[in-house]
Amino acid sequence: MTAPATTKELDAVVLGAGFAGLYMVKRLRDMLGMSVRAFETGDNVGGTWYWNRYPGARCDSPSYIYCFSFDKELLQEWEWSGKYPEQPEILRYLNHVADRHDLRKDIQFNTKVTAAHFDENTNRWLVETDNGDRISAKYFITGIGCLSAGQVPNIKGLETYQGDWYHTGSWPHDGVDFEGKRVGVIGTGSSGIQAIPVIAEQAGHLYVFQRTPQYTVPARHETVDKAFLDEIKSRYDEIWDKARWSQGGQPIDPVERSALDATPEERQQIYEELWKEGGHGFLFGSFWDVAADRRANDTASEFIREKIREIVKDPDTAEKLLPVDHPFASKRPLIDTNYYETYNRDNVTLVDIRHDPIEEITPKGVRTGGEEYELDIIVFATGFDAMTGAFDRIDIRGRQGYPLREKWSEGPKTYLGVANAGFPNMFMITGPGSPSVLSNMPVSIEQHVEWISDAIDHMEKNGYQAMEADPDAEKEWVEHVNEVADQTMFTLADSWYLGANIPGKPRVFMPYPAGVGIYREKCDEVVANGYEGFHLETKQAEPAATR
Ligand code: NAP
């Protein structure tokens, strides 16, 4: 890619206008005084919350901590209505942030970045879009989301289907009318378990096509009252500080008791209390070893299986819903509203496709187990090509034209999940190799945006032209991420964390599981040691040698 005469010169290009892109634009423009433009595929801000509008879409982090902390006045002003924030409310919040900080003027909507190539002669990135824009920028920063590349499985016959079909991750803005319809939902991950109970209330009949049964704990979603929020607001600094140095980006004290030291009666009582309370407290507030030791985990897994047997009235359906092939929380832990209860409805049928996989999609519906299920609407709640998929869809090339997708062909290799050796001046907000999806995302996003803008500030103040991860530091980081992952339950399930949901994707654990506090400490140490593990160049690069 060469730079034609019409190329626009900017300091920085940012990809995406979700939490990450919005804050990145704010920092670079208002703190560093840079010229910056964000490119966003959608016609408005919101990222994940712009696209995922399926019924029941909601975040699993408590609303008071699923927001930006940088704007302290807004923290005091904003009144969340629910214990967990619902998609429309989060979208409203992000629109408000964009307006309040006048961010839209530096965001180009309806524009997809198609290519970004590093030019070693100038130490600048040349960025191209599907609208024909060409931009030259010193810094190229991605805020493209970890779960933004939707995955519709390649099932034979989809093109012949005569009904309507949708993927939860790119839901129609006008909604979908399920009233009285025969609906099929394929997939029972976070999106499926949120959508299924809501669709069941509207549909004539709902068929749930389940490949892997899930462990899910009641969310106990409810409205929050003003007194509760006022109390939170009175100690917000302390709450944020706790979240920033925690395991998962939530203001939770780690529990020290072990499930294996407790008596069966004590365990039962604790699990019961936390089940009643709802939310992720069941995992984080029960016993420390549930997420770390298989025998401890078995006690929690069995408790949930027992709950399923108790809640679901039809024993055959209950049996099909029992998760037995992976431990609790080895996949993304789920919280729900009336998920298991939904299977007691007369208009809901669970179809086990583990034993009888979908053979084909026919013009009328789905064929499995020799039976054809006639459907007016199919909902694919089948997930995403996580963490790397959104990168793969852009032609990103570093030194000597080397493609990022080739560098990552055996799994993503990054330094700190923020930078790539061979790709100077490119920074990833919550990239693979950082805590990202294992944390409350706004906490991780703010940390990365601040770390990246501080690094850029450092470069500008000291006249550096290029900043690039050292290949050895990167190698060590990748090994470290794998070592930590091997000590967890996560490698015991076929999950998108490992790329297992995408046929042919290398099986590599992608996020960093040691926790946001430990990770923050490491990132701070890198800075304290003079950006250890990075090369900083002061002069213009020499023309590229051949590879
Ligand atoms: P997911 O967790 O990857 O679940 C996809 C579901 O589709 C699984 O049940 C999977 O079965 C099934 N599936 C995939 N391909 C299939 C095929 N070819 N045939 C039949 N079934 C198939 O995707 P997701 O539910 O969209 O969630 C992705 C992530 O987004 C979550 O883990 C979470 O991080 C985030 N998210 C969060 C929230 C929230 O905060 N509440 C809500 C939605 C999404 P297998 O398990 O057998 O592969």
Image: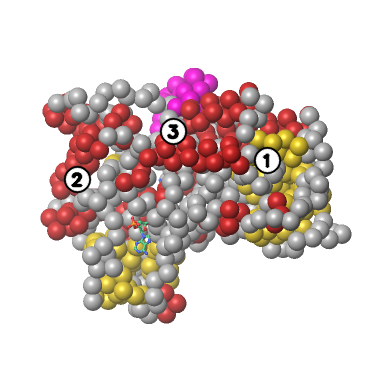
Dot label at residue 514: 3
Q: Mark 2 and mark 1: span between their CA atoms? A: 49 Å
Residue 74, quarter of picture: top right
Q: Residue at x 55, y 53 (%)?
A: 408
**x and y, in percent, of residue 307 in the image:** 18, 43
Instruction: Classify the position of ligand 1 by quadrant: top left, top right, bottom left or bottom right.
Output: bottom left
| Position of 367 relative to 530 (above/below) | below
Find disc 2 in the rendering and name its residue.
305
| Position of 224 relative to 502 (above/below) | above
Labels 2, 1: front one? 1
Left or right, residue 456 beside residue 158: right
Q: Report the front residue among 360 and 50.
A: 360
Q: Which residues are magenta?
A: 224-246
Question: Crowdedness of circle 1 by 10 Å Cα count: few (<14), some, many (20+)?
Answer: many
Q: Residue at x 63, y 27 (%)?
A: 527
Q: Residue at x 40, y 77 (%)?
A: 157
> Does the segment drawn in magenta span residue 245?
yes
Earlier-in-chain disc, 1 versus 3: 1
SS of the residue under disc 1: strand
Residue type at mark 2 is Arg
- Pointer 1 with pointer 3, Cβ within 8 A: no
| Position of 303 relative to 371 (above/below) | above
Residue type at mark 1 is Glu
Q: Mark 2 and mark 3: span between their CA atoms? A: 28 Å
**x and y, in percent, of residue 167 in the image:** 45, 62
Dot label at residue 468: 1
Q: Residue at x 63, y 24 (%)?
A: 529
Q: Report the front residue among 91 and 189.
A: 189
Whether residue 370 is visible to the viewer of this picture, yes or no, is yes
Q: Report the front residue among 353 and 95.
A: 353
Q: Mark 1 and mark 3: span between their CA atoms? A: 24 Å
Earlier-in-chain disc, 2 versus 1: 2
